[in-house]
Image (tube, coloured by chain):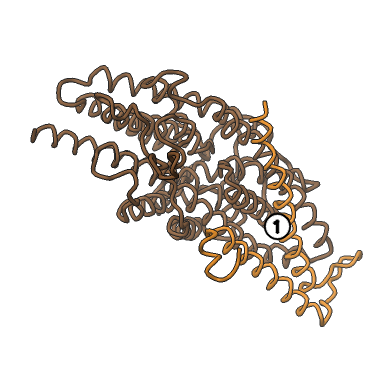
Amino acid sequence: MSTILTSISPIWKVLLVGLVLGAGLPALFAFGIRASAGTVGPDGTTAAPEPAGRAIAAVSFVVVALVVVAAIVVLASTKAFLAKFGLS
Amino acid sequence: MMIRLMTELIILVLVVGTALAFDFTNGFHDTGNAMATSIATGALRPKVAVALSGVLNLVGAFLSVEVAKTVAKVVKIQYTKDVKDAAGKVIHHAGEPLPFFNAAGGHHLLITIVFAGLVGGIIWNLATWLLGLPSSSSHALFGGLIGAAVAGLGFSSGVDWTLVLSSIVIPAILSPIVALIIAAVGTWLVFRITNRTPEKAREKGFRWGQIGSASLVSLAHGTGDAQKTMGVIFLALVAHGSLDESGDIPIWVKISCAVAIALGTYIGGWRVIRTLGKGLVEISSPQGMAAESASAAVILTSSHLGLALSTTHVATGSILGTGVGKKSAKVRWNVAGRMAAGWLITLPIAAIVGAICWYIADLLKGPADGLIGILVVFAILVVVASMIYLKSRKAPVHADNVNAEWDDSAVAPQSDPTADRTSASV
């Protein structure tokens, strides 16, 4: 039984990290889309995006890209590889 | 002496070839996990999607620094970690065959188990592909090996059943649920955030996100799945005696495995792509991005934690989750149920096929170091594969009809525009 419990426990970490990265990053990306695309009012007319919208969008897209790149580096590299750059 | 060396070499070549064939089926069976949603929403043209996925699988196969020499820890054929003596000196390396290997006939026993396991995995992969069922290639391989190990070594001396439960069965049940929850939350958030964004801008914007997240899944697939075949070939080389177990995996093994999985991916398992992209949920590009992001996050995190999850189970859970997370979405639970049934029987059926193949190979071992038995099983594989291929031709799915309207009665679209089709169909 304990073996089974041990095998289940890491799944919580997967769920947590997954919610932060797997659901959080698309949400951040969605903010970028929202900021850059303008809005549809209740009457069906489209309002132009606010001037700051493009900047907000750019920031959110860049953050998404950086987090993805960072995640790949962390996941694809062994501890020995990271140690070369003083990371652990 | 000459003859014995020749037969051993022929057997090795057959086993390595079969391992690469498995790797190839692994590629085309799993293309849909990464690319089905991008193809369904039109974010990528079908041919471009499979080409991109193929290249990323190739890159992924080389990306991982450490290559596991242990094929499947559940099968008791190898040491799963370094064993040290009292002085701290390594006496058994991880990946080294267990002691039965050095008994009389041990080499052939090991190679027959690996071979029969591979054949079981390939046959199951092809059969489920014919039915358009996304099923786990890793489970097919593990199942084949488990069956062959039970047949060759005995029920409890061949397989670690507690490990089967904890490292295969339980993750298989939990991983689609976890992926489903994450994708549902992601989908809900994304639609919530963009509820006042014009439809066209939203659809267009998320296509880019979708391509990015699908690429990540392809990359993750290459890092995980190509390695399994590398491990199998390593084991075959050790069993043959042409490689020492403490040695590195030769570069030609890495290259050929990477190329085999990439080619398989590029061929595109259109039948499976169609079921995943059109059969479960009608997908829009925000849902596609939410699904692929959830899949990528779950696969990469779990592999980092040393949990071997099936890409297929995760991807299917994610796609279902995007249907759950969007209010108006219609989820075809009957299709999902068929898939779940397929997952349940993947391991046992592959195991039965693996065991049968082992018995046939053993029964017809013959005088020439078991060559006849191996050849007969190989012939069976070729015949079964050809029959499945011919059957698939009767109702082909290809790049041009993969997105046709879903019809619950069959995998392939009923009105098939074969007359004017341009591309090869797999």
Up the image or down, A59 lies above or below B6; here it is: below
Q: Chain of mark 1?
A: A
Q: Which quarter shows the C terminus of chain B?
A: top left
Q: Is residue B24 visible?
A: no
Q: Residue furthest front?
A: B87
Residue under the point 43% across and 24% down: B158
Measured from the top left, where is residue B341 in percent x and y?
Answer: 59, 27
Is residue B183 shown left or right of residue B218? right
Q: Is residue B216 visible?
A: yes
Q: Is residue B222 above or below residue A33?
A: above
Q: How far from the left and from the top, in percent, is residue B200?
A: 72, 65
**Chain letter tied to brown:** B
Q: Colour of chain A?
A: orange
Foreground residue among B238 and B220: B238
Nearest the camera: B300 or B96?
Answer: B96
Q: In terms of image quadrants, where is residue B217?
A: bottom right
A2 and B289: which one is in front? A2
**Which quarter of the picture shows residue B180?**
top right
Q: What's the residue at 50%, 24% (across, down)?
A: B348
Residue to which mark 1 is pinned = A21
Residue B22 screen position, x and y as percent: 38, 40
* Amino acid marked by disc 1: Leu
Q: Quadrant of the N terminus of chain B?
A: top left
Crowdedness near tag 1: few (<14), some (14–19) or many (≥20) residues, C-alpha within 10 Å: many
At x 55%, y 30%, the residue is B163
Q: Residue furthest bottom?
A: A51
